Amino acid sequence: MARQLDEQIIGHFPVGRRLRVLDVGMGQGTQALRLARAGHQVTGVERDPTMIEAAREALAAEPAGIQERVHLVEGDGQETGVHFLPGSFDLVLCHGVLMYVDEPDPLLAGLGRMLAPGGVLSLLVRNGDALAMRPGLAGDWAGAVAAFDTVGYRNRLGVSARADRLDALTESLAGIGAPLRAWYGVRVFTDQAPDGAARPSDPEMETLLAAEERAGRTDPYRRVAALLHLCGSRG
């Protein structure tokens, strides 16, 4: 999934351009480090002390040149205006965060203000239009029926979360001056893979990624993906 997201994001910028990146809710810093290794300047924001400590440890294991390209901030993604000037970033990532935010519009508005002209806001959210797919494919018919009428769900860790619908987010992005440029489905075929499943062989993995990438850009498959990846652009 990570490589798929990277390719979808970087495709919106000229080849070889070095980006100023803000990663909000960066977790352990996996994506931040991957982008820094690719030559980009990355600022990661995370409020969970355990996660940011893990990110610091991972960063410390990197070569000095990569360490210099990463800045870690312990803080809340809803307070970006406290830490950064408007228009400071070419790319703002908000992946796997909105599902834990009850009212996403203030957060989105703050992230939109961080975008430089031509900048891209990348959102990864749970697909509220396809919540019935996981229980339905697992044979949980009652769960599938219930999922049609809600955007609330419990993730695999048992934590309550909220899904987002494509139409609503499209409207929200337009409202913050970063209208939707492109959207993709993520985990179209692999959402049912059990936790801890063995990694496929390299050739099989390449084929799997090719199938996911194609489905993620193609209707009707992308509309039933477990996750949606939306890219809004400032100007």
Image: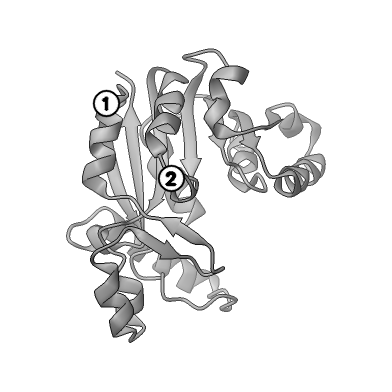
Q: Amino acid at mark 1?
A: Gly
Q: Amino acid at mark 2?
A: Asp
Q: CA distance from mark 1 to mark 2?
A: 18 Å
Secondary structure of the residue carrying numbered label 2: loop
Disc 2: which residue: 102
Secondary structure of the residue carrying numbered label 1: helix
Count of numbered circles on the image: 2
Q: Nearer the viewer, residue 226 or 169?
A: 169
Q: Residue at x 56, y 26 (%)?
A: 79
Looking at the image, residue 183 sits to the left or right of residue 110; the answer is left
On the question of residue 116 being in view, the answer is yes
On the question of residue 14 being in view, the answer is no
Where in the figure is residue 215, as x and y percent of width and height? 28, 61
- The earlier-in-sequence mark between 1 and 2 is 2
Disc 1: which residue: 175
Q: Residue at x 40, y 38 (%)?
A: 104
Where in the figure is residue 52, as x and y percent of width and height? 72, 42
Q: Dot 2: within a 10 Å radius of its alpha carbon, few (fewer than 14), some, or many (20 or more) residues? A: few
